[in-house]
Amino acid sequence: MRVDCTNLIGGEWVPTANTVENRCPANTDELLGTAPASGVDEANAAIAAAKAALPAWRETTAPQRGALLYRLVRLLERDTDRLAEALSREEGKIFREAKGEVGKTIRYVEFAAGDCRRMTGITSESELPGTLAMTMWRPHGVVGLITPWNFPVCIPLWKIAPAVAAGNTVVLKPAPETPITAHIIGELLMEAGFPPGVVNIVHGDVAPAQALIEHPDVKAISFTGSTEVGRIIERACGERHKPVQCELGGKNPLIVLDDGDIGKAAAACALGAFGSTGQRCTATSRAIVMNEVADDFVEQVLGLAASMRAGHPMDERTTMGPSVSDRQLEQVLRYMEIGQGEASLRCGGSRMLDDGLDKGYFPAPTLFDHVAADARIATEEIFGPVLSVIRVGSLDEAIQVANAVDFGLTGSVFTSNISRAFQVVHELDAGMTHVNNPTIGGEAHMPFGGIKATGVGPREMGPDAWKFYAEEKTVYINHAASERKSSIY
């Protein structure tokens, strides 16, 4: 697979003078192609194309917009393997997980297509005689979407779909680490019949993203990425009175009570901590375990960690791929070193270099035990296969420890007691809570997002996702046949 990506601007594939290489993180000898290193000029051209396409697209009926999204669903189904292979090779996610991501994307685009017939408002009798009160929705206009590398199919499309469903035109700035998946998305959107300029794609790093945030013709920004960058974007949009939606970091706890199923808890924890190389905002990074069952739990997770097989993501024997880049690997290794000064290292703690892994960015599945609740590895996002086990004496202490971080995306509790489960549901500071399930996952018809430093703005996915991309307008219609006196005003 080799793809030399270009920008999609106004329905045309537009090359740039400056490009960067795209290499497989599992084997850096594997050149996948090149991608544009775009700057402000390319972003401005895409914004202009989106603005030019807006009037016709805004007047296209919502059901017609939905019909195009349904066409896109069929094309995604047709090209699932192609997208999953591109995702695996350039991001490092194993092929099985990559196919799962494409499947989730299909379900969400299908749900968003249905939203095009569900954009309802309020109708009501007015206080004014002979007057009907109602609400309607209008798109913002041009919206900027800035997306990460860890879900490079799902996240761009779970932003694009509700944005275009609501009648906006879009400029997507995908992550520079995963240009091929964005390129294929652009091809499929064009094949589905979206008019030129409705969706534009500009590759690059900071410069085009900053241009989207600062340009006056871009009326809203949706961003998924790090908390540090998200705070910069929040401030910049706030200064411009620009609606902003940010889905940021997580430090997600899996609570194991003394009456929980330890085998299921350990399996869920290993999946959440080591699956996708820990590169999920919903990854399990903390296991908060009651003292009575902690030893058993740790031994079972250690066994599952030892069974992980690192390798090329397209090898069907592989159960864990690499970190996405050398920069990401260095961050993970730095926290592994920090952890060795804070807690008891039970497995991992280094880079894997044996069995041909030396040409990739492979961190070992790592477990730290007897971690203090305020340790850096227990409070800061690592975004790698690193698990901190914190031992506690009670349910109340478990909840207190779980809430003692800046983040609040998701969490899980394993218990057989429904009252204790609902105590966690009510008291855990998180946008999502699972009972006897892993911390990972989300569904098209349910809201996705967090609180505290994790999320700003309305939730993504679910039945109201499109509302971020629209303004609500209240309308009063006087339909009286003759003038009527009001006793109200």
Image (cartoon, rainbow, N blue to C red):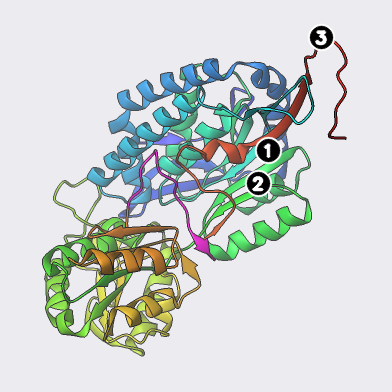
Res 332 quadrant in image: bottom left
Q: Is residue 35 visible?
A: yes
Separation of marks 2 and 3 at Cα, in angstroms: 55 Å
Give the side of residue 167 with respect to residue 27, left or right.
right
User: What segment is highlighted magenta in the picture?
Assistant: 441-453
Q: Which mark is drawn over residue 216? A: none
Res 257 quadrant in image: bottom left
Res 392 quadrant in image: bottom left
Disc 1 secondary structure class: helix
- Taking 240 as reference, is 56 above or below it? above
Tell me whether the residue at label 1 lies in contact with that at label 2, contact meaning CB atoms closer than 8 angstroms: yes
Question: Which label's residue is closer to the chain start, 3 or 1?
Answer: 1
Q: Is residue 14 visible?
A: no
- Give the residue pinned by disc 1: 42
Coordinates of residue 226 in the picture (x, y in percent): 52, 61
User: What quarter of the picture does the N terminus occupy?
Assistant: top left
Question: What kind of residue is marked 3?
Answer: Ala
Report crowding for label 1: few under 14, some 14 to 19, many 20 or more residues within 10 A (C-alpha).
many
Depth-wise, is mark 2 or mark 3 nearer the camera? Answer: 3
Give the side of residue 31 with respect to residue 190, left or right.
left
- Give the residue pinned by disc 2: 208
Residue appearing at x 52%, y 56% in the figure: 225
Q: Nearer the viewer, residue 285 or 361?
A: 285
User: What quarter of the picture does the C terminus occupy?
Assistant: top right
- Taking 153 as reference, is 49 above or below it? above
Question: Which label's residue is closer to the chain start, 2 or 3?
Answer: 2
Residue appearing at x 38%, y 79% in the figure: 401
